[in-house]
Image: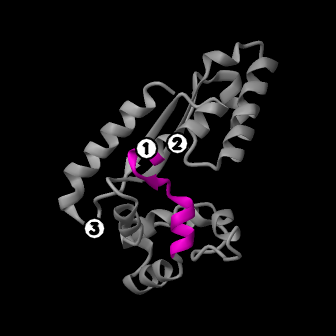
Amino acid sequence: MLEMCGRHGDGWIPTHLSPADYAAGLDQVRTAAIAAGRDPSTITPAMWSFAVCDDTHELCHKALRSPFVKAAVLTAHPDVFGRHGLEHPLGQFGLTRYVPTHLDAAATTAALDAIPFEVVHDHIPHGTPEEMAGLVATYAAIGLRHFVPWPLSFVDDLARVGPSFKALARLARLCDDL
């Protein structure tokens, strides 16, 4: 898929990757572009990710404990769990096995209960706008041009909708110069 993107695409937008995995993937895309006789700078590197951005780190941690945010982690690759010495609650296939309508309430609850906070904490980018801008800067140094967050800050507390979107707006302004 990365080679095809380099040969034919005008952008690359993977779902959340570690900085090392992002760098390796972007290198593969750019190498494929060069091999196809294309200018790799014409391919726009981006990244989509669930994200928790709020006024304080403590509010972010509260959101990370939400069953909804934990459900988002069920879409993660099994390697995310493997880094913690754990098996993905849905087995080795992760996302391909996570069809919410195929799980009854007991199976869903068991899967969510099997996800420790540390896995959620390490997998879901989170922080204040300033902290998140630091993370985005790490990816920008690799080549990222666009970070596309899917906000999860307010999923358990609708009173946080306005403040979390204001925090995302601050994050966007901080990232303008990256």
Disc on res. 80: none
- Give the amino acid at mark 3: Asp
- Give the amino acid at mark 2: Gly
Q: Main secondary structure of the magenta part?
A: helix
Along the polypeptide, which appears first: circle 3 or circle 1? 1
- Residue tagged 1: 130
Residue 44 screen position, x and y as percent: 57, 24
- Give the amino acid at mark 1: Glu
**For residue 43, above or below residue 70:** above
Quadrant of the snapshot with the N terminus: top right
Q: How far is disc 2 from disc 3 in space, using C-alphas?
A: 26 Å
Q: Is residue 86 visible?
A: yes
Nearer to us of marks 3 and 1 is 1
Which element type, helix, strand or loop, lies under badge 1? helix
Magenta range = 117-131
Tell me the crowding category of disc 3: few under 14, some 14 to 19, or many 20 or more residues within 10 angstroms, Cα based: some
Left or right: where 75 falls relative to 79: left
Residue 76 screen position, x and y as percent: 57, 61
**For residue 80, above or below residue 87:** above
- Residue tagged 3: 156
Q: Do the residues under discs 1 and 2 have CB atoms within 8 angstroms?
A: yes
Nearer to us of marks 2 and 3 is 2
Residue 22 screen position, x and y as percent: 66, 41
- Report the residue at 18% width, 60% height from top: 159
Which element type, helix, strand or loop, lies under badge 3? loop
Disc on res. 134: 2
Residue 16 screen position, x and y as percent: 56, 48
Which element type, helix, strand or loop, lies under badge 2? helix
- Report the residue at 61% width, 24% height from top: 9
How many tags in the picture? 3
Q: Do the residues under discs 3 and 1 have CB atoms within 8 angstroms?
A: no
